[in-house]
Image (tube, coloured by chain):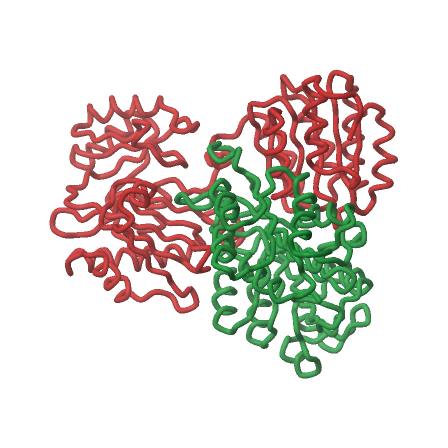
Amino acid sequence: MSILLDGKTRVLVQGMGAEARRLIPTMRDYGTNIVAGVSPGHGGEEVEGIPVYSTVSAARREHEIDLSVLFIPARFARDAALEAIDGGVPVVNVVAEGVPHHDACEILTRAGKAGTLIVGPNSQGMLSPGKAKVGGTGGEVPDLMFRPGPVGVVSRSGGMGAEISLALTRAGIGQSTYVAIGGDLLIGAAFVDILKLFEKDPETKCVVMFGEPGTAREEQAAEFIASGGFTKPVVAMIPGELLENSETPATQSHTGALIERGVGAPSVKKRLLREAGARVAERFSEIVPFVRDALDEAGGT
Amino acid sequence: MSRLLETDSLDLLAGHGVPVPEYTAAGTPEEAAAAVEKMGGKAVLKALVPTGKRGKAGAVKFVSSPSEARAEAGHILGLTVRHFPVSRLIVMEALDIRREFFLSITFDPSRRCPLVLFSPTGGVDIEEIVSERPDQLFELPVDITRGLEAYECVSFAESAGLEPGPALGCGRAIHAAYRAFRAADCRTIEVNPLAEIAGGQVIAGSGVAVLDEQALFRQPDLEKKLGEEQGNGWRPLTDLEQAIREIDAINPHVSAIRFNELDGDIAFLISGGGYGLSSFEQITREQGRPATTFDITPGPFEEKMYRVVKTVYGKPGLRGMVLSANVSNFARVDRRVAGIVRALKELDIDYERFPVVVRYDGPGAEEGRRLMAEVPGAEMYGAETTLEDICKRIVDRAYGRGSAEGP
């Protein structure tokens, strides 16, 4: 199994422009079941052999949809996401980087009321190795980075989630699903939401989570683990402790990576995760051996 | 960060109905003295800089005559507040403050909503309230799709322990500040103190608005106010940072660059939000001293990478350069490397004295390696290595430690 996405997941693509034309072949070649696309004003056309509708509701009249991925520029992401939410799509992946925070807040509020799970914004996508992928992750070279296996990977950074998967793959350890939850201040699915899904997935034996400074998402994950909500071993890496007291901005492309009002210090996140029983890597090279330990603890690879 | 100056922040708040005192900007002691005279002889002078903690830097002064204003203005105009040299002041009407409150509106990433923070104990840093008087900090989460009604703000202020009179004034100010927060796409608004003055009126004693950089495309008037004074958010731009800004301006929306100059000696051109941070920390852990931070969004990198490498190489005192990014999904490695190679060829570097360590992989990696081979001496690695390997490698080479063998 896997979470959120497999070869049977019926995927809608919103925004059939240049980015979609580039990404659709790589997604489909990997096994993604793309059933329809939406492009306002282009209903009735076909792109890469996929039927295009002008609206989400028109697409839904002809197709069952499990997940929508938005290849929509940041400034238009709000409208497209709200259309997906109102159209009853259960999972929506917002890929765009740079979505205005007020727009993201509206998307997430409406999604919360409708029961829609938003992954993103500023998410590189998700990938269940050997089954399917949505978004940019894996790109043209998914087999370099990913192979099927027992490790769930969840990351605020798309690049680091891919690097961790690559290191595991090179060590012969595969992944169940990789989810890039996004680097922005306001995102939908957080670590706890993804841990809940990995808990229920029998194929996932342990989880690697990559966190960053800022927000309380890692702290909440630690609390969730400590309270028994997640029972599988966790390996975590959260950089930034050495820069906590520096005025140099730690990372500039992730709007969530700011320590504000004393919340979000990596030192605190790491301590809480350790206290909850997670293996916390200081260095990247510790991740693979920690995952091996975690898999031993979980009882078999 | 995109922090409006206090005059612009107060303009914004006033425009949405928050009561504000009389204020004006002054660039010389004479202008300050004239403004104070116009305000009746008493005023507050504050450095007009895009940063906080001005009081602690001695850049806030109460004056009670134009001549005192002239002297104090001359003093403040010579200060540097948290890296920002003071070139202008805000002259603000002196308020007869009876009581100070704290008001902030920001986003709560956990609840995913706007959050009004209010304290009946104002005039001190929010950090101080959080750590010393957490029971005096009151929170009002807002459903952004529904907004905030005035009566809710008033009853919120009452729930914070205020009597009906001040609760009405504070509630109205909160309501107006929330309108400004929404209308200007703010990340944060802070009014500290929000002050009750003689006569009972509640008025903003100060104001800060931090704008959302991701929404500036639809706030063109406010974007214009974020001038050069912003620097890179925490201090004014250095000459090198200014030069990189000019390179970025070739095409600001394609392969956008973020860059900071630091005091170190390793040119650090490793991009990616999480990947760059992890690498920066790893180099620091290895006792290396990064001289820059860098990020570039995917696109046709070649020209910008060429110019960045050439320009950064000119920074005095460098011991080496490291260039990398996480394994890319689509961004062409060869496009990036082509720009780097072009720069390195022109620079005529002695790689024994100035090591250059590169790690890229993804589409176009093979062609990228072939291109890099045209520059013997520069080291190129790929997915067979990790970020940790190349961080160790550049530190070893730059400071003459470790083995001659690469990772």
Q: Residue at x 30, y 38 (%)?
A: B24
Q: Position of residue A250 (x, y in %)?
A: 54, 38
Q: Position of residue A217 (x, y in %)?
A: 50, 53
In the rendered structure, the answer to whether residue B141 lies left or right of residue B259 reads left
**Residue with the most extreme left position:** B199
Q: Which of the pair B87/B241 is nearer the observer?
A: B241
Quadrant of the rendering where the C terminus of chain B is positioned: top right
Quadrant of residue B314 within the rendered picture: top right
Question: What letter labels the chain drawn in red?
Answer: B
The number of numbered discs placed on residues in the rendered structure image is 0
Residue A175, above or below B247: below
In the rendered structure, the answer to whether residue A254 lies left or right of residue B372 reads left
Q: Position of residue A193 (x, y in %)?
A: 55, 62
Q: Colour of chain A?
A: green
Residue B80, above or below B385: above
Q: Residue at x 56, y 26 (%)?
A: B262
**Residue with the most extreme bottom position:** A61
Q: Residue at x 31, y 25 (%)?
A: B76
Q: Which of the pair A109/A288 is nearer the observer?
A: A288
In the rendered structure, the answer to whether residue B248 lies left or right of residue B101 reads right
Residue A262, above or below A90: above
Quadrant of residue B277 within the rendered picture: top right
Q: Position of residue A55 (x, y in %)?
A: 64, 75
In the rendered structure, the answer to whether residue A22 lies left or right of residue B223 reads right
Residue B184, above or below B400: below
Q: Residue at x 59, y 76 (%)?
A: A87
